Amino acid sequence: MNSVDLHSLTAIQAGAALREGSLSATEYVQACLARIRQTEPQVGAWIHLDEEYALRQAKTLDEHRASGRPLGRLHGLPVGLKDIIDTDDMPTEDGTVLHAGRQPVSDATLVARLRAAGAVIMGKTVTAELASMHPGKTRNPWNPAHTPGGSSSGSAAAVAAGMVPLAVGTQTNGSVIRPAAFCGVHGFKPSFGLISRHGVLQQSPSLDQMGVFARSVEDIALISDVLIAHDPHDPATRPGAHPRLGEVMRDDPPLPPRLAFLGTPIFEEASQDCRDGFAELCDALGETITELSLSDTYRKAWEFHRTIQLSELSHHYRADYERGSDRLSLALRENFERGRQTPAHEYLAALAARQPLYEGIERTLEEYDAFITPAAHGAAPASLETTGNPAFCTLWTLFGMPAINLPLLRDGQGMPIGVQLVGRRGDDARLLRTARWLVSRLAQGEH
């Protein structure tokens, strides 16, 4: 296989070649590093990358394979990690000068699971400041004048640019789905509590969720199956059987999935290209899709999310604020102050409002396999001073529901517009099966 083509492989394709021996881990990592050297000056996806260390990991994995021992599910596959995820062998600086040079003494739980599965930890990808709003150096691989989104900007851009087949990020509002949409890749935020957050920067524990980036729905299932597990260090995770995403996703649905196009109260704010694209998409799906809208009761949900996020942010970032507020961005300082000034009764009321609102959503979803809705207002804004508006992700993050971005639409300039599928909490496997069905149907042009 031509090394020039290796960077375009999906994780499933590369994994098959690595297992059968037609491709070594060293060859694959070398190809990814060559792609990074080629594209990193324009994209700026990495904050920490040690080529020699990546190759040493690959060599160890090749020796493991040569020994005849069983291979992990991610054997030889390079993975990028958002720079708020602890690693014991490279810095984790959280996108802020206040944590410059910070070296954790142990891996985050998810990093340990990646290593055990045979992944090559390529390095740390750029995050917005403390995983909040102030953008890092990353540019959109489709057009460097446009934002890649945030706060998992580097992870999304690294996959989009062909630097790595897989990457990990986090979402507290829209920080997985939005950059995936802007960068034209698949992004998946599982149900709240499925992937451990132990060893990951805490911003808002009631909302913080892990997510992954990849080049296909199948790749999403591959890495998610490795990461989903109970962890006693993270009380949001629960013991018990976990969804077998890959196994369920590969099966054909017993009946054609039923989709509901959900016009949330903010759909009117979407760009014209986005609205036109979704109109065409609904026409293509025909009787498979039904148009629904949410009641005005849900208009307060965005306010509830903001109250929870900023209240908890002000608590968890208090030490950084007190020792170096002058070195934090104005946007973060303002959000900290808003959170600190929020009355306790408003915070508690926002927490209490979530479950009744979610139950209304869940009853609606009993009739459908998934909601389909924009992942963002439209294509990535032509600005490097913003990470874009996360509002189209807010509801699903607030309710802890699984969501996946599918890069199915383009605007008039050819920039990606994301299609977001959302499922019931805990129904992640069904959601990925529906996503795979949708991609296949549209690819076949079955109208």
Image (tube, rainbow, N blue to C red):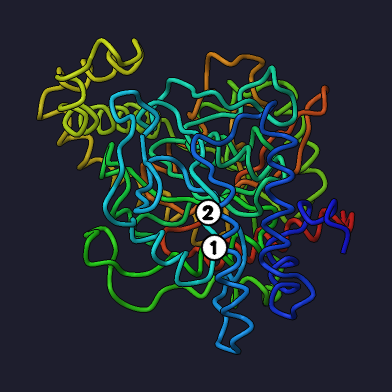
Identify the residue at horizontal 73%, vertical 65% (top origin).
Answer: 14
Circle 1 SS class: helix
Q: CA distance from mark 1 to mark 2?
A: 6 Å
Q: Position of residue 186 (x, y in %)?
A: 64, 49
Image quarter where the C terminus lies is bottom right
Q: Quadrant of residue 283?
A: top right
Along the line of sight, the residue nearer the viewer: 11 or 123: 123
Image quarter where the N terminus lies is bottom right
From this view, report whether residue 107 is shown above or below residue 346: below
Identify the residue at horizontal 71%, vertical 70% (top origin).
Answer: 24
Residue occupying the far bottom of the picture: 68
Residue occupying the far left of the picture: 344
Judge the density around disc 2: few (<14), some (14-19), many (≥20) Cα neighbours within 10 Å.
some
Amino acid type of the residue that numbered disc 2 sits on in the rendered structure? Tyr
The label number, if any, that marks residue 57 in the structure image = 1
The label number, if any, that marks residue 121 in the structure image = none
Q: Quadrant of residue 291?
A: top right
Left or right, 98 with respect to 136, comes to: left
Q: Which residue is mark 2?
A: 53
Along the line of sight, the residue nearer the viewer: 198 or 30: 30
Q: Position of residue 6 (x, y in %)?
A: 79, 56
Left or right, 257 with respect to 311, comes to: right
Say whether marks 1 and 2 touch (CB < 8 Å).
yes
Along the line of sight, the residue nearer the viewer: 37 or 10: 37
Amino acid type of the residue that numbered disc 1 sits on in the rendered structure? Gln
Q: Position of residue 307 (x, y in %)?
A: 25, 28
